[in-house]
Amino acid sequence: MTDTRRTSIFAVGMFLLALLVATTLLSLASGAFRISFLDLLRIIGDGPSGEPIDGVAHNVFWQVRLPRVVLAVVVGSSLAVAGVIMQGIFRNPLAEPATVGVSAGAAVGAVIAIIIGLNEFPLGVQIAAFIGGTLSTALVYLLSRSDGKTEVVTLILTGIAINAFAGAVIGFGVFVADDDDLRSVTFWSLGTLGLATWKAVGVVAPLALAGMLISTRFARVLDILALGDRPASHLGVRVEPVRLQAIAVVGLLASSAVAATGIIAFVGLLVPHIMRIVLGPRHRHLLWTSALLGATVTLLADLAARTLLSPAELPLGVVTALIGAPFFLLLLRSTRRSQGGWA
Protein backbone atom coordinates (compact mmCIF):
# COMPACT_ATOMS: atom_id res chain seq x y z
CA MET A 1 0.00 0.00 0.00
CA THR A 2 1.33 3.42 -0.96
CA ASP A 3 1.90 6.20 1.57
CA THR A 4 -0.78 8.30 -0.16
CA ARG A 5 -3.30 5.48 0.24
CA ARG A 6 -2.44 5.04 3.92
CA THR A 7 -2.81 8.77 4.47
CA SER A 8 -6.22 8.87 2.81
CA ILE A 9 -7.48 5.92 4.86
CA PHE A 10 -6.16 7.51 8.04
CA ALA A 11 -7.87 10.80 7.12
CA VAL A 12 -11.19 9.02 6.53
CA GLY A 13 -10.86 7.23 9.86
CA MET A 14 -10.10 10.44 11.75
CA PHE A 15 -13.04 12.17 10.08
CA LEU A 16 -15.39 9.34 11.07
CA LEU A 17 -14.06 9.37 14.64
CA ALA A 18 -14.53 13.14 14.91
CA LEU A 19 -18.03 12.83 13.46
CA LEU A 20 -18.88 10.13 16.00
CA VAL A 21 -17.62 12.26 18.92
CA ALA A 22 -19.60 15.29 17.70
CA THR A 23 -22.74 13.22 17.20
CA THR A 24 -22.34 11.66 20.65
CA LEU A 25 -22.13 15.07 22.33
CA LEU A 26 -25.13 16.31 20.36
CA SER A 27 -27.14 13.22 21.31
CA LEU A 28 -26.22 13.60 24.99
CA ALA A 29 -27.34 17.22 25.01
CA SER A 30 -30.52 16.94 22.92
CA GLY A 31 -33.92 15.48 23.66
CA ALA A 32 -37.20 16.27 25.37
CA PHE A 33 -35.09 17.48 28.30
CA ARG A 34 -32.34 19.68 26.86
CA ILE A 35 -28.94 19.98 28.52
CA SER A 36 -26.65 22.84 27.52
CA PHE A 37 -23.10 21.91 26.51
CA LEU A 38 -21.76 23.82 29.52
CA ASP A 39 -24.01 21.85 31.87
CA LEU A 40 -23.10 18.69 29.99
CA LEU A 41 -19.39 19.23 30.68
CA ARG A 42 -20.15 20.07 34.31
CA ILE A 43 -22.25 16.89 34.77
CA ILE A 44 -19.53 14.74 33.20
CA GLY A 45 -16.99 16.37 35.51
CA ASP A 46 -19.17 15.70 38.57
CA GLY A 47 -19.26 11.98 37.78
CA PRO A 48 -22.21 9.65 38.43
CA SER A 49 -21.92 9.92 42.21
CA GLY A 50 -20.94 13.59 42.46
CA GLU A 51 -22.82 16.46 44.13
CA PRO A 52 -24.96 17.79 41.23
CA ILE A 53 -26.06 21.40 40.95
CA ASP A 54 -29.10 20.30 38.93
CA GLY A 55 -30.32 16.93 40.16
CA VAL A 56 -32.80 16.43 37.32
CA ALA A 57 -30.22 17.05 34.57
CA HIS A 58 -27.73 14.85 36.43
CA ASN A 59 -30.16 11.91 36.62
CA VAL A 60 -31.36 12.36 33.04
CA PHE A 61 -27.77 12.27 31.79
CA TRP A 62 -26.42 9.34 33.83
CA GLN A 63 -29.52 7.14 34.03
CA VAL A 64 -31.33 7.82 30.76
CA ARG A 65 -29.32 9.65 28.12
CA LEU A 66 -25.84 8.11 28.52
CA PRO A 67 -26.91 4.41 28.53
CA ARG A 68 -29.06 5.11 25.49
CA VAL A 69 -26.17 6.71 23.61
CA VAL A 70 -23.74 3.94 24.59
CA LEU A 71 -26.22 1.29 23.49
CA ALA A 72 -26.76 3.09 20.17
CA VAL A 73 -22.99 3.09 19.54
CA VAL A 74 -22.69 -0.60 20.40
CA VAL A 75 -25.70 -1.67 18.34
CA GLY A 76 -24.81 0.48 15.33
CA SER A 77 -21.25 -0.82 15.29
CA SER A 78 -22.41 -4.42 15.63
CA LEU A 79 -24.92 -4.20 12.78
CA ALA A 80 -22.42 -2.48 10.47
CA VAL A 81 -19.66 -5.03 11.12
CA ALA A 82 -22.16 -7.88 10.69
CA GLY A 83 -23.14 -6.32 7.36
CA VAL A 84 -19.51 -6.18 6.22
CA ILE A 85 -19.06 -9.88 7.00
CA MET A 86 -22.34 -10.85 5.31
CA GLN A 87 -21.49 -8.96 2.14
CA GLY A 88 -18.03 -10.48 2.17
CA ILE A 89 -19.01 -14.12 2.54
CA PHE A 90 -21.87 -13.80 0.05
CA ARG A 91 -19.87 -11.58 -2.36
CA ASN A 92 -23.02 -9.48 -2.59
CA PRO A 93 -23.29 -5.80 -1.55
CA LEU A 94 -27.02 -6.28 -0.94
CA ALA A 95 -26.54 -8.83 1.85
CA GLU A 96 -27.18 -7.92 5.48
CA PRO A 97 -27.81 -9.77 8.78
CA ALA A 98 -31.52 -10.09 7.99
CA THR A 99 -30.55 -12.23 4.98
CA VAL A 100 -30.00 -15.28 7.19
CA GLY A 101 -33.00 -14.63 9.41
CA VAL A 102 -31.14 -13.28 12.43
CA SER A 103 -33.23 -10.15 12.89
CA ALA A 104 -36.57 -11.84 12.27
CA GLY A 105 -35.68 -14.76 14.54
CA ALA A 106 -34.72 -12.40 17.33
CA ALA A 107 -37.99 -10.52 16.86
CA VAL A 108 -39.93 -13.78 17.14
CA GLY A 109 -38.16 -14.61 20.39
CA ALA A 110 -38.96 -11.18 21.80
CA VAL A 111 -42.61 -11.26 20.73
CA ILE A 112 -43.14 -14.71 22.27
CA ALA A 113 -41.46 -13.53 25.47
CA ILE A 114 -43.76 -10.51 25.70
CA ILE A 115 -46.90 -12.54 25.07
CA ILE A 116 -46.11 -15.20 27.68
CA GLY A 117 -45.14 -12.60 30.25
CA LEU A 118 -41.34 -12.85 30.32
CA ASN A 119 -41.18 -9.07 30.06
CA GLU A 120 -41.94 -9.05 33.78
CA PHE A 121 -38.44 -10.40 34.43
CA PRO A 122 -35.25 -8.30 34.08
CA LEU A 123 -33.85 -8.69 30.54
CA GLY A 124 -36.36 -11.48 29.86
CA VAL A 125 -37.27 -10.15 26.42
CA GLN A 126 -33.65 -9.48 25.49
CA ILE A 127 -32.50 -12.97 26.43
CA ALA A 128 -35.39 -14.55 24.52
CA ALA A 129 -34.58 -12.40 21.48
CA PHE A 130 -30.92 -13.41 21.56
CA ILE A 131 -31.91 -17.09 21.73
CA GLY A 132 -34.38 -16.61 18.87
CA GLY A 133 -31.81 -14.93 16.64
CA THR A 134 -29.17 -17.56 17.35
CA LEU A 135 -31.57 -20.46 16.71
CA SER A 136 -32.85 -18.95 13.45
CA THR A 137 -29.28 -18.50 12.20
CA ALA A 138 -28.47 -22.13 13.01
CA LEU A 139 -31.71 -23.30 11.39
CA VAL A 140 -31.06 -21.40 8.15
CA TYR A 141 -27.54 -22.79 7.96
CA LEU A 142 -28.63 -26.40 8.61
CA LEU A 143 -31.49 -26.28 6.12
CA SER A 144 -29.26 -24.87 3.39
CA ARG A 145 -26.54 -27.54 3.71
CA SER A 146 -26.35 -30.36 1.20
CA ASP A 147 -23.59 -32.96 0.87
CA GLY A 148 -21.50 -31.11 3.43
CA LYS A 149 -21.60 -27.84 1.49
CA THR A 150 -23.62 -24.66 1.64
CA GLU A 151 -24.56 -22.90 -1.57
CA VAL A 152 -24.80 -19.14 -1.17
CA VAL A 153 -28.00 -18.90 -3.25
CA THR A 154 -29.64 -21.68 -1.24
CA LEU A 155 -28.61 -19.97 2.00
CA ILE A 156 -30.18 -16.67 0.92
CA LEU A 157 -33.40 -18.32 -0.29
CA THR A 158 -33.65 -20.28 2.97
CA GLY A 159 -33.18 -17.04 4.87
CA ILE A 160 -36.02 -15.46 2.89
CA ALA A 161 -38.29 -18.39 3.76
CA ILE A 162 -37.41 -18.17 7.46
CA ASN A 163 -37.99 -14.41 7.38
CA ALA A 164 -41.43 -14.96 5.86
CA PHE A 165 -42.30 -17.56 8.50
CA ALA A 166 -41.01 -15.29 11.26
CA GLY A 167 -43.12 -12.43 9.90
CA ALA A 168 -46.20 -14.64 10.09
CA VAL A 169 -45.39 -15.60 13.70
CA ILE A 170 -44.93 -11.93 14.62
CA GLY A 171 -48.23 -11.08 12.93
CA PHE A 172 -49.97 -13.83 14.89
CA GLY A 173 -48.37 -12.50 18.06
CA VAL A 174 -49.74 -9.04 17.33
CA PHE A 175 -53.18 -10.60 16.75
CA VAL A 176 -53.32 -12.51 20.05
CA ALA A 177 -51.56 -9.92 22.24
CA ASP A 178 -53.72 -8.09 24.77
CA ASP A 179 -53.91 -4.32 24.92
CA ASP A 180 -51.11 -4.08 27.48
CA ASP A 181 -48.70 -6.09 25.36
CA LEU A 182 -49.74 -4.92 21.89
CA ARG A 183 -47.88 -1.61 22.02
CA SER A 184 -44.74 -3.33 23.34
CA VAL A 185 -44.86 -5.99 20.63
CA THR A 186 -45.43 -3.47 17.84
CA PHE A 187 -42.94 -0.88 19.05
CA TRP A 188 -40.24 -3.47 19.80
CA SER A 189 -40.59 -5.18 16.42
CA LEU A 190 -40.05 -1.77 14.78
CA GLY A 191 -36.91 -1.03 16.81
CA THR A 192 -36.32 1.29 19.73
CA LEU A 193 -33.60 2.48 22.08
CA GLY A 194 -36.20 3.69 24.55
CA LEU A 195 -35.62 0.64 26.76
CA ALA A 196 -31.89 1.26 27.13
CA THR A 197 -30.52 0.65 30.62
CA TRP A 198 -27.09 0.02 32.05
CA LYS A 199 -28.11 -3.64 32.53
CA ALA A 200 -28.87 -3.95 28.82
CA VAL A 201 -25.55 -2.29 27.97
CA GLY A 202 -23.76 -4.67 30.32
CA VAL A 203 -25.26 -7.67 28.54
CA VAL A 204 -24.92 -6.51 24.93
CA ALA A 205 -21.56 -4.70 25.02
CA PRO A 206 -19.37 -7.74 25.90
CA LEU A 207 -21.07 -9.85 23.20
CA ALA A 208 -20.69 -7.09 20.62
CA LEU A 209 -17.06 -6.44 21.54
CA ALA A 210 -16.25 -10.14 21.34
CA GLY A 211 -17.94 -10.41 17.94
CA MET A 212 -16.12 -7.37 16.55
CA LEU A 213 -12.75 -8.59 17.82
CA ILE A 214 -13.32 -12.04 16.30
CA SER A 215 -14.40 -10.46 13.02
CA THR A 216 -10.94 -8.95 12.49
CA ARG A 217 -9.48 -12.41 11.92
CA PHE A 218 -11.71 -12.80 8.84
CA ALA A 219 -10.42 -9.68 7.06
CA ARG A 220 -7.83 -11.39 4.86
CA VAL A 221 -10.03 -14.45 4.24
CA LEU A 222 -12.93 -12.29 3.09
CA ASP A 223 -10.62 -10.57 0.62
CA ILE A 224 -9.70 -13.97 -0.82
CA LEU A 225 -13.33 -15.16 -0.89
CA ALA A 226 -14.11 -12.22 -3.18
CA LEU A 227 -12.31 -14.23 -5.90
CA GLY A 228 -14.87 -17.04 -5.61
CA ASP A 229 -15.08 -20.32 -3.70
CA ARG A 230 -12.93 -22.36 -6.08
CA PRO A 231 -10.03 -19.88 -6.34
CA ALA A 232 -10.19 -19.36 -2.57
CA SER A 233 -9.89 -23.12 -2.05
CA HIS A 234 -6.86 -23.24 -4.36
CA LEU A 235 -5.27 -20.49 -2.23
CA GLY A 236 -5.66 -22.60 0.92
CA VAL A 237 -8.91 -21.25 2.36
CA ARG A 238 -11.20 -23.88 3.86
CA VAL A 239 -14.29 -22.21 2.46
CA GLU A 240 -17.04 -24.14 4.26
CA PRO A 241 -15.61 -23.95 7.81
CA VAL A 242 -14.79 -20.27 7.30
CA ARG A 243 -18.32 -19.53 6.09
CA LEU A 244 -19.78 -21.35 9.10
CA GLN A 245 -17.57 -19.42 11.51
CA ALA A 246 -18.37 -16.11 9.82
CA ILE A 247 -22.13 -16.75 9.95
CA ALA A 248 -21.78 -17.64 13.63
CA VAL A 249 -20.09 -14.26 14.25
CA VAL A 250 -22.85 -12.50 12.31
CA GLY A 251 -25.39 -14.31 14.47
CA LEU A 252 -23.60 -13.19 17.63
CA LEU A 253 -23.39 -9.56 16.54
CA ALA A 254 -26.86 -9.21 15.05
CA SER A 255 -28.69 -11.25 17.69
CA SER A 256 -27.20 -9.24 20.54
CA ALA A 257 -28.03 -5.96 18.74
CA VAL A 258 -31.60 -6.91 17.86
CA ALA A 259 -32.12 -8.35 21.34
CA ALA A 260 -31.37 -4.93 22.80
CA THR A 261 -33.24 -2.65 20.40
CA GLY A 262 -35.51 -4.63 18.10
CA ILE A 263 -35.21 -4.66 14.33
CA ILE A 264 -33.24 -1.71 12.94
CA ALA A 265 -33.29 -1.70 9.16
CA PHE A 266 -30.62 -0.64 6.66
CA VAL A 267 -27.68 0.02 9.01
CA GLY A 268 -26.08 -3.34 8.21
CA LEU A 269 -26.87 -2.90 4.52
CA LEU A 270 -26.16 0.74 3.83
CA VAL A 271 -23.09 1.51 5.95
CA PRO A 272 -20.76 -1.19 4.50
CA HIS A 273 -21.89 -0.23 1.01
CA ILE A 274 -20.96 3.42 1.61
CA MET A 275 -17.57 2.54 3.06
CA ARG A 276 -16.84 0.18 0.18
CA ILE A 277 -17.45 3.04 -2.26
CA VAL A 278 -15.18 5.36 -0.24
CA LEU A 279 -12.33 2.98 0.67
CA GLY A 280 -12.54 0.10 -1.76
CA PRO A 281 -13.00 -3.63 -1.09
CA ARG A 282 -10.27 -4.40 1.49
CA HIS A 283 -12.01 -5.75 4.58
CA ARG A 284 -9.15 -4.80 6.88
CA HIS A 285 -10.26 -1.18 6.51
CA LEU A 286 -13.97 -1.79 5.95
CA LEU A 287 -14.50 -3.44 9.33
CA TRP A 288 -13.35 -0.65 11.64
CA THR A 289 -14.51 2.26 9.49
CA SER A 290 -17.95 0.68 9.10
CA ALA A 291 -18.13 0.27 12.88
CA LEU A 292 -17.51 4.02 13.32
CA LEU A 293 -20.01 5.04 10.64
CA GLY A 294 -22.61 2.51 11.85
CA ALA A 295 -22.45 3.96 15.37
CA THR A 296 -22.83 7.51 14.00
CA VAL A 297 -25.76 6.64 11.73
CA THR A 298 -27.59 4.89 14.56
CA LEU A 299 -27.01 7.83 16.91
CA LEU A 300 -28.32 10.31 14.32
CA ALA A 301 -31.35 8.15 13.59
CA ASP A 302 -32.13 7.80 17.29
CA LEU A 303 -31.73 11.55 17.76
CA ALA A 304 -34.27 12.11 14.98
CA ALA A 305 -36.59 9.47 16.46
CA ARG A 306 -36.81 11.19 19.84
CA THR A 307 -36.78 14.85 18.74
CA LEU A 308 -38.82 15.14 15.52
CA LEU A 309 -42.15 14.62 17.31
CA SER A 310 -41.00 15.36 20.85
CA PRO A 311 -42.19 14.46 23.44
CA ALA A 312 -43.52 11.50 21.40
CA GLU A 313 -40.93 9.06 20.08
CA LEU A 314 -40.82 7.46 16.65
CA PRO A 315 -39.72 3.82 16.26
CA LEU A 316 -36.03 3.79 15.43
CA GLY A 317 -36.43 1.14 12.72
CA VAL A 318 -38.97 3.34 10.94
CA VAL A 319 -36.55 6.28 10.91
CA THR A 320 -33.63 4.21 9.56
CA ALA A 321 -35.87 2.75 6.85
CA LEU A 322 -37.27 6.15 5.86
CA ILE A 323 -33.76 7.56 5.56
CA GLY A 324 -31.96 4.46 4.35
CA ALA A 325 -34.25 3.23 1.57
CA PRO A 326 -34.19 6.37 -0.64
CA PHE A 327 -30.48 6.90 0.03
CA PHE A 328 -29.70 3.33 -0.93
CA LEU A 329 -31.71 3.67 -4.15
CA LEU A 330 -29.63 6.75 -5.00
CA LEU A 331 -26.45 4.78 -4.35
CA LEU A 332 -27.64 1.96 -6.59
CA ARG A 333 -28.51 4.44 -9.32
CA SER A 334 -25.13 6.15 -9.03
CA THR A 335 -23.29 2.80 -9.10
CA ARG A 336 -25.19 1.60 -12.15
CA ARG A 337 -24.53 4.88 -13.98
CA SER A 338 -20.78 4.68 -13.27
CA GLN A 339 -20.75 1.13 -14.67
CA GLY A 340 -22.55 2.15 -17.85
CA GLY A 341 -26.00 0.92 -16.82
CA TRP A 342 -29.26 2.81 -16.73
CA ALA A 343 -29.06 6.47 -15.72
Image (tube, rainbow, N blue to C red):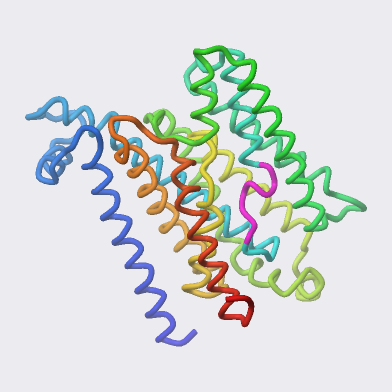
Which residue: 92% across, 53% down?
A: 147
Q: Nearer the viewer, residue 202 or 124?
A: 124
Q: How many marks?
A: 0
Q: Is residue 254 left or right of residue 294?
A: right
Q: Position of residue 253 (x, y in %)?
A: 56, 45
Image quarter in which the C terminus is found: bottom right
Which residue: 48% across, 74% down?
A: 279
Which residue: 56% across, 80% down?
A: 338
In this view, the residue farthest toward the front is 343
Q: Nearer the viewer, residue 101 or 198?
A: 101
Q: Position of residue 296 (x, y in %)?
A: 38, 53
Q: Position of residue 91 (x, y in %)?
A: 69, 66
Examine the image and state in which quarter residue 303 appears.
Answer: top left
In this view, the residue farthest toward the left is 53
> From the viewer's perspective, is residue 122 above or below residue 61?
above
> From the viewer's perspective, is residue 249 above or below residue 190?
below
Magenta stretch containing residue 113, yes or no? no
Residue range highlighted in magenta: 94-101
Q: Position of residue 70 (x, y in %)?
A: 36, 42
